[in-house]
């Protein structure tokens, strides 16, 4: 029998808004675009961001590493569930990118979280696009 006792998350510390991205793109494009083209770029980006319905993104900054967020979320989930790492029997890493080829990314999380009794493996899948 499988039981999911907790679900947690962890996010990078740098919050980036749509306005931040637009300002950055306009600043980087300033020497290549005249004023009307810059205004068109800004309006186009604003419209695209509005359609995406995403207002904020998060980016990691040094010394943060991508794996740190998974480890942090795992530790939070263990605490929330009121268990210890030795209680975990199975760890499945599911992602669209491979953090490590060998050992599997799940093995790295297994080690970092102290899952000494867990079997672990990776399941990787990514969108193949439209056909």
Image (tube, rainbow, N blue to C red):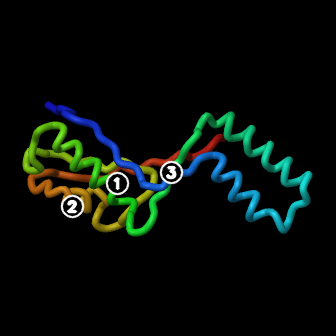
Residue occupying the point 34% across, 43% down:
9
Location of the C terminus by quadrant is top right
Name the residue carrying label 1. Answer: 69
Q: Is residue 109 left or right of residue 42?
A: left
Frontmost of labels 2 and 3 is: 3
Badge 2 local density, few (<14 within 10 Å), some, or many (20+)?
A: some
Please identify the quarter of the rendering in which residue 48 is found: top right
Disc 2 versus disc 3: distance between alpha carbons?
26 Å
The residue to which callout 3 is attached is 15
Secondary structure state at the residue bearing disc 1? helix
Looking at the image, is mark 2 or mark 1 nearer the viewer? Answer: 1
Check the image and report above or below for 79 versus 111: above
Q: Earlier in the sequence, mark 2 or mark 1?
A: 1
Residue at the image position 56 percent from the left and 51 percent from the top? 16
Give the x, y percent position of residue 63: 38, 68
Quarter of the image with the N terminus in it: top left
- CB atoms of marks 1 and 3 within 8 Å: no
Q: Which residue is identified by label 2?
A: 112
Looking at the image, tell me whether mark 1 or mark 3 is earlier in sequence order.
3
Up the image or down, 59 lies above or below 4; here it is: below
Distance (Cα) linking label 1 and label 3: 15 Å
119 on left or right of 25: left
Secondary element under disc 3, as helix, strand or loop, is strand
Q: Residue at x 84, y 68 (%)?
A: 31
Horizontal side, residue 68 vs residue 54: left or right: left
Height in image: 52 above or below 28? above
């Amino acid at each position: 029998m499988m039981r999911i006792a907790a679900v947690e998350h962890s996010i990078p510390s740098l919050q980036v808004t749509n306005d931040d991205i637009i300002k950055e793109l306009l600043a980087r494009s300033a020497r290549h675009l005249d004023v009307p083209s810059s205004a068109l770029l800004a309006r186009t980006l604003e419209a695209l961001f509005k359609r995406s319905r995403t207002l904020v993104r998060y980016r990691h900054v040094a010394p943060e590493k991508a794996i740190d967020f998974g480890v942090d979320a795992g530790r939070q989930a263990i605490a929330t569930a009121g268990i210890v790492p030795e209680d975990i029997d199975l760890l499945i890493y599911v992602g669209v990118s491979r953090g490590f080829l060998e050992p599997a990314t799940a093995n790295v999380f297994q080690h970092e979280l102290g899952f000494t009794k867990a079997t672990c493996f990776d399941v990787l899948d990514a969108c193949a696009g439209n056909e």
